[in-house]
Each structure stands twice: as C-alpha cells, then as structure tokens.
C-alpha cells in the first residue's frame, strides 16, 4: 500500500481512535461505533477508508463483520519514519562535528 495513503488515513482523528480500539482486540462495527457519537454510516466510511489503506482487515463471523488491526502496514510506515529520524540524528552529529572542526582555536584569529 502507498505510504501516502496510509499517512493520509492516519491523519483523521476518528481513524486513529478506531486503530487504537483495534490495538487490543478485534471488534465488529457495532462495538466500534458504540465508542463514538457519530452515525453508524460515518463509522462505516471510516472503516472503509482504513480497509482501503490496508490498515485494518475484516472477516465475516456469522452475521457480523469483525475488524482487526493489520500491523504489517503500520510497521512499514513506522520503519520509514524511523529511518528519517535516524538520518536526522546522523546528520545532526555530522553537523556538530563539522562545526567543532571549523571553529577557530582559542586565541588564534583568522
């Protein structure tokens, strides 16, 4: 799944709350919607967006559709963000070293 779609989907606060609910257990749409003050139709749209981004998976159990977190897509997004963080740290360390070596030594003027 495209990282852009994952990040855009995670930008919505209700989508993030749904992901947080699914972090601890699989739930059906009614159980998810009981945590929100929006309509069941709105929750259905959020669940469809989460499924389209492959952040959640669904399976049918009798007359219920059960939703669960798909951690593999989240792992990919987190790994990408972590690579940015570590690159920044490495760059920051290099900048710090460069600044120290470029400073004039005490008592000497250029």
Image: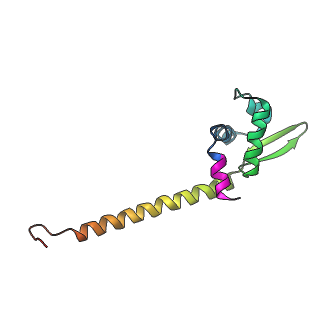
Q: Is residue 85 shown left or right of residue 79?
A: left
Vertical arrangement, residue 14 with respect to residue 54, above or below: above
Q: Nearer the viewer, residue 9 or 92?
A: 9
Does the magenta portion include 45? no
Q: Position of residue 61 (x, y in %)?
A: 87, 40
Examine the rendering and report whether any part of residue 82 can be seen. yes
| Residue sitting at the far right | 62
Q: Nearer the viewer, residue 20 or 10?
A: 10
52 relative position to 103: left or right: right
Farthest residue, direction left: 107
Residue at figure coordinates x 70%, y 29% from the top left = 36
Of the 4 image quadrants, the one containing the N terminus is bottom right
Position in image of residue 77 (x %, y %): 61, 56
Assign the magenta stretch its main secondary structure: helix
Count of labels in the image: 0
Residue at 64%, 49% in the rendered image: 8
- Is residue 28 shown to the viewer in this render? no
Q: Position of residue 91 (x, y in %)?
A: 40, 65
Q: Within the magenta stretch, is there residue 7?
A: yes
Q: Residue at x 68, y 38 (%)?
A: 18
What quarter of the picture does the C terminus occupy?
A: bottom left
Q: Which residues are magenta?
A: 2-9
Which quarter of the picture shows residue 25? top right
């Amino acid at each position: 799944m495209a990282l852009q779609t994952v990040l855009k989907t995670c930008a919505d606060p209700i989508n993030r709350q749904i992901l947080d609910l699914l972090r601890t257990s699989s739930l059906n749409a009614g159980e998810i919607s009981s945590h929100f003050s929006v309509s069941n139709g709105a929750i259905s749209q959020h669940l469809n967006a989460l499924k389209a981004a492959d952040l959640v998976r669904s399976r049918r159990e009798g007359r219920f559709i059960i939703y669960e977190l798909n951690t593999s897509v989240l792992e990919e997004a987190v790994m990408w963000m972590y690579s940015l963080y570590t690159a920044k740290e490495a760059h920051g360390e290099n900048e710090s070293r460069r600044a120290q070596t470029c400073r004039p030594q005490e008592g000497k003027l250029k």
